[in-house]
Image (spheres, rainbow, N blue to C red):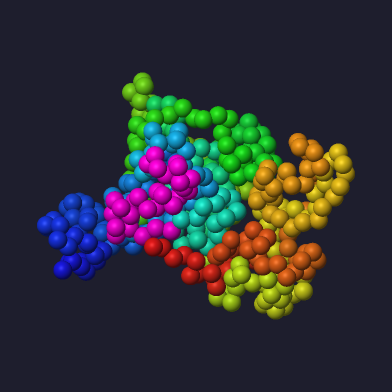
Amino acid sequence: MAKTSKKGSKLKLENTGVKTEHWDDTFRLMSWWDADRVSKANVMVVGAGALGNEVLKNLALMNVGSIFIVDFDTIEYANLCRSVLFRTQDIKLNKFKCEIAGERIKDINPNVKVQTVNGDIMIDVGLGVLRRMDVIIGCLDNRIARLFINRYAYKVGKVWIDGAIENLSGQLNVYKNGTSCYECALTNVDWENIRFKMGCADIAQRNSTQGRVPTTPISSSIIAAMQVQEAIKVIHGNEKQSMAGEQFKYDGMNNWIIQFKTEPVREECDSHYVIKDEELIKSKELTNEMTIAECLKWLKAHFKDDEINIQLNYKIILEIASMKSEITYELIIPEPHFSENKQTIYQAEPGEPIGITKYADRINSKFPNLDLKLKDVGIPPLHILTVETSEDTYFVELTGDESFLNYN
Ligand SMILES: [Zn+2]
């Protein structure tokens, strides 16, 4: 019979002859280790590339209970030299990074529960999902995704841990409301790059770096290990020893490590808005499966106000024109989902430029098709809507989607 701990999780060691009580018995020898907190923790990992692989491996080894993985990419041959969780056969089968990474960490530690989203953090993950996390770990190689995580994490009051690697070097930042902020540290050149990339319709283009970043599995394992160590501190509520407000830098070629205090947060910054608990309206009647008409009706009744606007942080394309032939097409598609692939359908001749001639950045009763579901216009499950009435701005969670968070 498998033994069950009072606090920890069941062991699946029948007939293996392995004698141990819990997966994390060795960790329990450390006086500060709280097995219960760790096994009940929810951690989001954004990016399942080189850093993400190492972070996920460590989270599984540390027995972190529930892991939510977000990545939009498939596995390529170039990933194998830095990704402990991927195999050659995954490429032939054209597998998604998040799915394979999820399966492999369950192989490492079957106690771990996993959920994956094959998509873009900018649009495909509801803010309510982030609100239910204990900590968010960014394993990214581009500024735009970092900026979005920063804004989302701030809004729902979560710490996020950012790792970056290049060559034999790497760095780590722990961002926490009021102490440190990714957006505050962006330079004018960073902003130029972000604005340029925001115009790219395709997820891969939007997230691409100028070229492949030269790096090694050594850099990623060092930085990812530090990221998970910081995440474990956040899970334990250990603020005193956290690196929040400091930057950690490592240079493996010249053998140096430095850690220094980062600039204090600025007064004016778009990231700093925090949704207070009392400001958040949660309703189980609301889901992203409802039509725009049903949702607007609910909001009008709730706020006793006929002027309702759901603000979006992306554009919904309503009309495009092929520039040379000047033919216009009406359509309804979130801009971040309008990839290069789809654009070719509207080109009268190959390579003809396509322009957006009409778009919506909010949803209200004038929206061209009120019978579409919220999910059809790019609103993910468990999202927190920003709702503008004639009086004020409110935050409304699609709490009816709660069952979306369903780890396996
Ligand atoms: Zn800021």
Q: Is residue 326 visible?
A: yes
Q: Quadrant of the C terminus?
A: bottom left
- Given the current orientation, which residue lies at the most extreme right position? 326
Residue 134 is a magenta residue: no
Q: Position of residue 237 (x, y in %)?
A: 35, 56
Q: Is residue 138 visible?
A: no
- Given the current orientation, which residue lies at the most extreme top position? 254
**Residue visible at 68% across and 71% down?**
291
Q: Is residue 184 above or below residue 62?
A: above
Q: Position of residue 117 (x, y in %)?
A: 50, 55
Q: Taking 14 as reference, is 145 left or right?
A: right
Q: Is residue 3 above or below residue 255?
A: below
> Relative to the observer, which residue lies in front, 136 or 87?
87
Marks counted in the figure total: 0
Q: Position of residue 285 (x, y in %)?
A: 59, 77
Residue 114 is a magenta residue: yes
Span of residues in magenta: 87-115
Q: Where on the picture, by quarter, is residue 190? A: top right
Q: Where on the picture, by quarter, is residue 305? A: bottom right
**Residue visible at 68% across and 57% down?**
312
**Residue visible at 47% across and 38% down?**
76
Q: Is residue 67 above or below residue 299?
A: above
Q: Quadrant of the N terminus?
A: bottom left
Q: Position of residue 322 (x, y in %)?
A: 82, 43
**Residue visible at 73% across and 63% down?**
363
Q: Is residue 91 above or below residue 132?
A: above
Q: Taking 280 as reference, is 315 left or right?
A: right
> Relative to the observer, which residue lies in front, 32 or 251?
251
Q: Taking 105 as reference, is 314 left or right?
A: right
